[in-house]
């Protein structure tokens, strides 16, 4: 998403269609409101992220607002009512703040309980008896395993 947003800002910046106040290559999208405003880190200087400032792009217009502080200070100031961002709707604090994680919680599947362990020695013995060249150690080749399963399960 940040790359797509940056590309649109680059087009606006190059054409002069909207007054993008910063080089789009230095803007990194870091959030959005449910109203559609985008929050950006101004990633300058590139090697000092603790000094990056915040800028907000108006949802349905060309307006920009810049905050001379870091993202944490910006959020605290907005959410406790100390900072009024003119681009945000006046009702921004009427509903409680809600945050949506950018990545879903990782889910670790449980191993199947109905799978029986396979006796690889039996597969190797069957393979040799049926003319397959099977190594004495290591992974059993897939085609041998599939042939054994067809033979032993009648598939």
Image: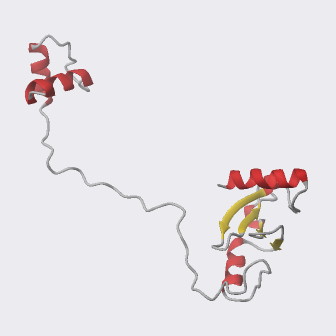
The image quarter in which residue 85 lies: bottom right
Quarter of the rendering occupied by the C terminus? top left
Q: In this view, does 15 lie to the left or right of 5?
A: right
Whether 27 is drawn above or below 101: the answer is above
Nearest the viewer among 72 and 7 is: 7
Q: Report the number of discs.
A: 0
Q: x, y (%) of residue 88?
A: 74, 79
Quarter of the rendering occupied by the N terminus? bottom right
Nearest the viewer among 94 and 2 is: 94
Q: x, y (%) of residue 17?
A: 88, 57
Q: Residue at x 10, y 23 (%)?
A: 151
Q: In this view, does 105 lie to the left or right of 132?
A: right
Whether 80 is drawn above or below 110: the answer is below
The image quarter in which residue 135 lies: top left
Instruction: Determine the residue located farthest toward the top in the rendered image.
Output: 131
Question: In this figure, which colouring scheme has been used for the structure?
Answer: secondary structure
Q: x, y (%) of residue 49?
A: 73, 62
The image quarter in which residue 71 lies: bottom right
Instruction: Determine the residue located farthest toward the right in the rendered image.
Output: 16
Q: x, y (%) of residue 30?
A: 67, 64
Q: Which residue is drawn at 74% across and 89% down?
A: 82
- Can residue 141 be seen by looking at this rendering? no
Q: In this view, does 112 lie to the left or right of 153?
A: right
Nearest the viewer among 117 and 55 is: 55
- Can residue 151 be seen by looking at this rendering? yes
Whether 111 is drawn above or below 82: the answer is above
Whether 48 is drawn above or below 119: the answer is below
């Amino acid at each position: 998403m940040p790359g797509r947003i940056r590309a649109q800002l680059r087009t606006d910046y190059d054409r002069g269609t909207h007054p993008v106040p910063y080089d789009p290559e230095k803007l990194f999208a870091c959030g959005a409101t449910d109203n559609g405003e985008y929050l950006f880190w101004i990633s300058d200087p590139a090697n000092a992220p603790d000094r990056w400032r915040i800028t907000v792009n108006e949802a349905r217009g060309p307006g920009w607002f810049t905050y001379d502080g870091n993202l944490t200070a910006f959020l605290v100031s907005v959410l406790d009512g100390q900072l009024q961002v003119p681009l945000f709707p006046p009702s921004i604090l009427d509903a409680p703040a809600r945050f949506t994680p950018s990545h879903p919680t990782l889910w670790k599947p449980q191993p199947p309980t109905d799978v029986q362990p396979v006796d690889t020695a039996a597969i190797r013995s069957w393979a040799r008896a049926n003319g397959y060249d099977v190594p004495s150690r290591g992974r059993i080749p897939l085609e041998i395993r599939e042939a054994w399963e067809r033979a032993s399960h009648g598939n």
